[in-house]
Amino acid sequence: MARLVVGPFNRVEGDLEVRLDVVDGQVREAHVVSPLYRGFEQILQGKDPLDSLVIVPRICGICSVSQSVAAASALAQAQGLSMPPNGERAVNLILACENLADHLTHFYLFFMPDLAREIYADEPWYPALAERFRAGSGVAAREFTAARARLLHLMGFLAGKWPHSLSLQPGGSTRAVQPQERVRLLMILGGFRRFLEERTYGDRLETIAGLSSRRALLEWRDQAPSGTGDLRQFLAVADRLGLDRLGRATDRFMSFGGFPLGESRLFRRGVWSDGVRDLDEGTIAEDLSHSWMLGGAEPLHPSAGSTLPLMEKEGAYSWCKAPRLNGQVIEVGALARQLIDGQPLVRELVGHSGGNVANRVIARLIESARLLIAMEEWVRQLCPGEPFCASGPLPEETQGVGLIEAARGSLGHWLRVRNGRILNYQIVAPTTWNFSPRDRNQVPGALEQALVGAPVRPGERTPVSVQHIVRSFDPCMVCTVH
Amino acid sequence: MSAPLGVLWLQSGGCGGCTMSLLNAESPELPGLLDAAGLRLIWHPSLSEASGDEVVSCLERLERGDEPLDLLCVEGALLRGPNGSGRFHLLSGTDRPMIDWVQSLAARARCVVAMGTCAAYGGITAGADNPTDACGLQYEGVHPGGLLGADFRAVGGLPVVNIAGCPIHPNWVGETLAALALGALVESDLDPYQRPRMFYDHLVHHGCPRNEFYEYKASALEHSDLGCLMEHLGCLGTQAHADCNTRLWNGQGSCTRGGYACINCTAPEFEEPGHGFQQTPSVAGIPVGLPTDMPKAWFVALASLSKAATPQRLRLNATADHLVVPPSVRHTRQR
């Protein structure tokens, strides 16, 4: 048996180490280590609750808005405040813009460059793919970076800047949209639609969002040469490399549901375990048995949880806690969200091959098409002249929960206020779920399970299959431990 | 043309947001920006292909001096805890504290640049009672020192160059690195907190579209109001050193344009203002924090005079979220 310690693991947000036991050219066991702790939950204690709106976005530079929206949502519940329709649309637009930019950043800058590594140089598809996606020299990254910067002009208008905006408030958005700006927002989205349709998909967004079965996807793929759009190119390579047989975890998924619209929401909330079930937030508990954290033997619900670092601890190997839903390991992310929402293609893909590298990437690109279509609709619905932000007092004793969907999956903030100050603030981020260490029953986290069986080629010290699996989750390590 | 300068970028106790902001660069966008600035990435955690063992051997080569290190860029605070061990951040794959790597590589670098307020002064990571004993490269809050010590000079002779901001503007990075590559940045170009004066000898107030409201102290009362944010909503734009409202963010944005307070994120210790970030502490109705270089007596006198003279248009628009009274159109010839 060989032991590999893989790190620093780049093109993930933050720092990550993966320890692998390799037997007969396969990973037999994996330990996932989050090596950085900053102490946000400790910093938040005792603060003015509204200061969380400044502090929490700075947990993460890539999920910054998501952290803000979760905090604002917890505060809104604590204040008993609801947003005017314009506020809801503006906040949805800002969050969707971040999620969309993040999904595509993952695809173009973080995930695809691994397929352009020298190790694949003998593959027939390699020259075309490497020209487009090689880190540092690929054409796609240049085109995407420019398109992304222009898309984020939406943030300049609606949120002042990105990352780290203070426009997201419990009662809505601080930035009321003026009539001429609505038109400008549509034009910004139109520009990004063009990039997606010309470069990413080689087809209309509506066609991509409407793909309704695996068969429809394969037929669509074969309609045009594989160079017509980056999704086609990915599908062809994924097929050759068998990426749909790589990186399967537990096939239990969760989504807090995304983008409220009055009484409804764009993406449905629920749990998937051989079918959609209701989600009971009360059954979330964080296990600390293998984390460098002080805590009792019993996993606690985040509203009663604590975050106190303890480096000298027998059996611990990560700063990450191990959240479990009803005691079970859960995978979150775009795949979970689209599956639970009932997007028919994603339903079929998971039914066919479960959660795996290929399906995670496909789900992100399907969701991206759906997001931009929704964003165009929300811009059209903005009503300049009507309010964007409600306000109200914050009770001295109160509590609130903010459950939202960030690009990478379910994000929860649990807030308790006493004497007008923060008594306790606990955060469970998407990658905390996906990259958790083992729990007290020695059950490995989702990535730890997904890595088992990954092939390791002779001489590899940073196995490329492991890189595909890890990055297929689009991990955000600065959110994971904060 | 000389060979491009090699840049190593490391991240520690921060959020990665400065890198994300750098990706917002335009004209040119990021890959072109590096070329235009005369730079070559040795390794960057978000952008490079190399991972795992490839990176560790690269860092070892740089540390031994086998490969020259022109610019060392550090993003995120340096975490000295627990108990001085630095083990709150072990660089993965190396079992070695990041502060150890940074100290060792800084000694080799021709120039060291702090990317963002965390790397410069500690920033948000050093908030409250600073649970991880975080500090900046050459400052601990306002105090010189930090990880590398007040006397540190990089091989090229400069102290740490602090590109402060939470996050930093992509152009601040591009133009600073380009200036360094051209040899056009010397110690006297840095302000007392070692920030390049070309960006930080401005105030956020300069170019703020709410300036007419400010002149008449026509103030916003609630979020999304159009009026000046200084009197009630915590805005520190008249004191904050940065060119945010003339340079602009993500196209046409800035904090005050986004409808919320400037929190002075380019300053050391901005993370602990001593009051709620969105509140303005005042004594007898006069804000405690006065505009930069303004004597208090004059501020009080001018404020009361301008309040008395506030035009109806500004008074009404200040507390609305859209224009309710447009500027009147004068039918006489302009003089």
Image: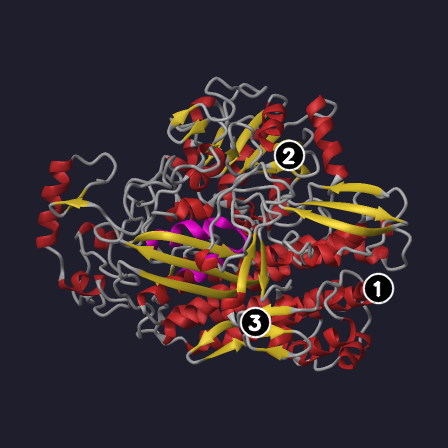
Magenta span:
A49-71
- Chain of residue at mark 3: A
The x, y position of residue B234, in whole percent, is 27, 49
For the residue marked with disc 3, what is the amino acid?
Leu
The coloring applied to the image is secondary structure
Asked whether, in this view, residue A1 is left or right of residue B198, the answer is right
Crowd around label 1: few <14 · some 14–19 · many ≥20 (10 Å)? few
Q: Position of residue A247 (x, y in %)?
A: 76, 60
Residue B156, percent across and down?
57, 20
Q: Is residue B55 left or right of residue A311?
A: right
- In this image, A454 relative to B325: left or right? right
Give the residue type that dot 1 points to.
Gly
The answer for which chain carries disc 1 is: A
Is the residue at mark 1 from the same chain as the one at mark 3?
yes
State the separation of the CA atoms marked 2 and 3: 36 Å
- Look at the image and say whether residue A139 sits in the magenta stretch: no
Marks 1 and 2, how far apart at CA = 35 Å
Q: Position of residue A92 (x, y in %)?
A: 46, 69
Q: Which residue is mark 2?
A: B8
Q: Chain of mark 2?
A: B
Of A79 and A167, nearer the camera is A79
**Which secondary structure is most common in the magenta stretch?**
helix
Q: Nearer the viewer, mark 1 or mark 2?
A: 1
